[in-house]
Every structure is written in structure tokens, then in C-alpha cells.
Image: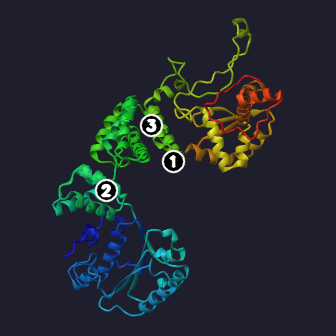
Amino acid sequence: MAYLVLARKYRPATFAEVVGQEHVTRTLRNAFGSGRLGHAFLFSGLRGVGKTSVARILAKTLNCTDEHHTDEPCGQCGSCRDVDEGRSLDVVEMDAASHTGVDDIRELRESVMYAAAEGKYKVYIIDEVHMLSKNAFNALLKTLEEPPPRVIFILATTEPYKVPVTIQSRCQRYDFRRISSADIAGHLAKICEKEGVEISHDSLRRIAIAAEGSLRDSQSLLDQILSYAGDRVADEDVNMVLGSLDRDKLMQILSACVDSDPGTALRMLGEMIDNGADPVRIALDLLEIVRSVMILLEVADSTDLVDLPEGELEVLRSLAERADPAALRIQFAILARGQERMRRFSQQRLHLELALVHMARSEEIVPVGSAPSGNEGSSSNRPTKKRTPSPPPVSPEESSALPAEPQTPLDVSTPPAFAGIETPRETWEQLVEFINGKAPSIGSMLEHLIPVNVAGEELVIGGRKGEIYLEVLQERDRISELQVLLQEFFNREVRVKFVEMEVEDRARNHNVVEKRQQKESDLARKIKKETREHPMVKEAMEVFKGELISIKVLGKASREPEDMESKEEEL
């Protein structure tokens, strides 16, 4: 006899056997008891959550010949067995994906007029009903609203928003929920017990999590794992088949970051990548682990929020006990920013390594709980702040005559927007380049302005008083468009504020256009100097007894590498 996969072998045969859909099964059973059974149903929900199975159970209950079973099928009578074996003349299953046309619905309408052959009801189960064409839906409308007596329609779909409202209004709609990992793991444990399979609870929970709420997917995964490992399944076998990363090493990487040990974090990362792990997948899984630790820290009873095997939960609880909540939030922001940069740029391993180093050194980026102290010469220990020149020293006599200015306290509870990833000046140029690609009109104006301050969730942009670019960007439509672009770039909401700069402050800061012109000017001077000193040029002047009057540089020099000498001597 051919092998029967677990998803078919353990398909629920009664309402009581359906997993995780009590709100649906209880309503249908009560409808049988009270006689309030509708003529059309719409079952919607994720794949593999029981829509077709419940439709078949409903069809069996309608035609069950056992008088003692009023709200459940007996499963033993001829009618129930015919439905289970797919040979019932009164239960018609139609795949709308392969019968999408209006002609198919016309045939259905003609067959509806005939009475049930053997049972009480004639049941039509239309799977993936959203695949029907517009004309087919229109042809179904009248029949669905007023079907002949003893005819029941059951429509199933994974995309209910594609079903016309006119169809939905003629049906009783039941939304099937995503099945929880705990319910799936419990069901898999019963299957393994019946099949004589030895497997740990953590492995079952990991399979349930990988199924993402689909019971059928979890059973298919279990089938695949049993084919690989046999009746004794180890945790390593589950990881191998699922293609999941080594969770222990991920925990060790995060633990090293919490303990300010970047060396260990980088070594563990190197081992995982050398073994074939994808850096992007590592970053995503690490984000999920950091998120779980953060929830364990912030929520007293987080059982429903953290969906992980018990073994991993114990490790994360011990990690949460020694983690600083404020530092963990900074590390989460750094890792999220690093993962977003991995998606937008090449050299993914480099960006992930950089993010891990900054996570391990997060206390140097923004001191948590106290003002910055100690090594002020370290650039990583200074939060980003307004880049304006310090005022000249004032004598005690002068200071007593000056009015007192309010002091703005340093916000050490919120990390800078670009904390630990790159310097604010470099990030500003990248932001302008990003906006230029999305909205050139706004990007070209930002090129003429200055990033005054980048801190927390606020970006302060400055310019000269009366500058046209500053005034245009403060228009309501421009600000709204800029806010959307900033949220897309930072992957979070960042407020924007415009300020007018003093003449001295503006003179000491250069915008993108000025820096580009300066770079081109520096490169031009370098080219002229090298040309003047080139041996062939000198030899030509000696041969022809000539004089070098001027040198003209053709083309733009804006693509000169960043490590070019910043200045050359004037010629």
C-alpha cells in the first residue's frame, strides 16, 4: 500500500478534532443544534489551518445517517465514508483555480437544480474561490443568494479581499485564525506518540514556529524530518532539515555583545559564515532574539509574546537578568540599522561585523544612565550634537555682566540617530544621495543646507537667514514628503526641524555642494601640479624653448576616492 503522508493520515474527521479553530467549530455545532444553519458559507484564512477539512466535516454532518449524531458526523455510516473517500455524489468539490470561467459556473447552476442523490443535502465546496473571473462571480450571484432547497454552498479562500463584496454579503463568513505554535506542537506530539517517534519538545516547538501558523505545513515538515532522521530525531536533525541557524551560537553572539566582548562575537560570526550561514539570515535571527530579550525585560508575563522553545527561553531569561534595558534598546537600534544597510548595500558581512562591534561597545556610543565622562578624546564616546564653534573664553568680569543663558541638558537616554554606524557628516551625505534618487527636487535643495544637529529622533537642518531653499522646504507639502523619505531611510519616524544659522556659524560649515566644489578644486590643483612636474612636459618645454602658461582640467573630478589628499599647495 502506498505511503499516506501525515497531513492526510491525521486529517480531522470531526469538529472536535479540529485544532485551533474553536470559534468556528463551536458556532457550526450550535447552528446544527438550534436549526439555524445558513445556505452559504465563506471560509477564509491562512493556508493549512483547516478550511477544507471543516467544509468536509460540515458536509458529512449534513448527510450523516446516524440519528444519535446531530452536531458531529459519526464517521461510520455509508454517507460519511463516501465523503471521506471522495466518492459521494452529493458532495461536489470544485477547484476554482482550474475552473475560473463563466461556463464552469453555468454548468454548476444547471446541476444545482437536481435534488440530492442519496443524502439530505447537496453540498458544493468551491476551493480558492477568489480565482473565479468577474463574469463567473456575477453568474454565481443569484444562485448563491437563493439556492434551491437542500443545497449548501461552502466557499474557501486564502485571499478574501479578492472576493467581491456582493458575494461576501450573501454568505456567512468565518475567518480561520493562525494556529498558535503551542497548539501545533501539542498536536505534533500526539502524532509522534502514535507513530512511535522519539523527539524533544523543543524540536517540536521549533517545527511549529517554522510552520508559521499552518498545521499542514508543520505536518509536512515533520514528515520530511522523519524521512531524514528516522524514528529517533535529534535537535541537530531538525536544524539541518529546517535550514535554521545554530541557535546556541546566536545566543553566544548576543551574550558577547551584552558582556562587551566584540572579539568573541566576531569569532562566532566567522564560524557561522564559514559553515555556510547567510549574513542576512544571521542579522534577522539576531534581531528576533534581541527583540525577545527586550520583551522579557519589559513585560512581566511575556509567555504569549515570546514564541520560543522552553530551552531557549531559559537562556534568554538568564541573559535578560544581566542586560541593561537602555543599552539593549541601543543595541537593537544598531542591529536594525545594520540590517537595513545590509539590504541596501553590498559587503553584507562587513556591515554585520561593524554592527556587532558597535553593539559590544554601545556604552561608548551613548553612556547609559549618566553623563559622558572619562575618555573625551574618543570619537565613539561623544554623542552627536550641534556642530557650532565654541564661544571664546570670557573673563569673570565679563561673565557677570552677561545675562544667564538656559543650559540644555544632554539627553543621554536616547542614542543619536546614527549611533555607532557612521559619523553624522558621512550619513548626511548618504541621506542626501538617497533623497536625490527618490525626489531630486528635495535632494537638490538639501545639498545647499547644513545638518545642524542629529540626535535622538530629531534632525535639525539649517541655512542662511532668508535662504530660498530653507523657505521652500518648510512648505507643508514639502515637509510631508520629506518626512516620508526620512522614515524610509531611517526605518523609523524621525522629526525634521529647520533653523536659521548665524553668519559665522554658516561660514564655518560647508554644505554638500560646497564640499563637492572644494573636492573638485583640490583635485584640479593636484592635476595641475602633477602636469607641471611631469617629465614629458618639462622635456617638451626644453625642446621647444616654450613656457607653460596655463593648464585646463577637462571633465568633472567629483568621483575622486575619499582617501585623496585633502589639500595641495597652491601653484
Query: Tag 2's secondary structure?
Result: helix
Q: What residue appears at the point 52 percent right and 24 percent down from the top-left corner?
A: 381
Residue identifier under label 1: 343
* 2 or 1: mark nearer the eye: 1
Q: What residue appears at the point 70 percent right and 38 percent down from the top-left corner?
A: 557
* 2 or 3: mark nearer the eye: 3
Q: Earlier in the sequence, mark 2 or mark 1?
A: 2
Viewed as shown, does residue 163 lie left or right of 198? Answer: right
Residue identifier under label 2: 208
Q: Inspect this view and state whether residue 527 appears.
A: yes
Amino acid of disc 1: Arg
Residue identifier under label 3: 353
Q: Inspect this view and state whether residue 329 appears.
A: no
Viewed as shown, does residue 176 lie left or right of 137? Answer: left
Q: What residue appears at the point 46 percent right and 76 percent down from the top-left corner?
A: 129
Tell me if residue 547 comes above or below residue 319 in the rendering.
above
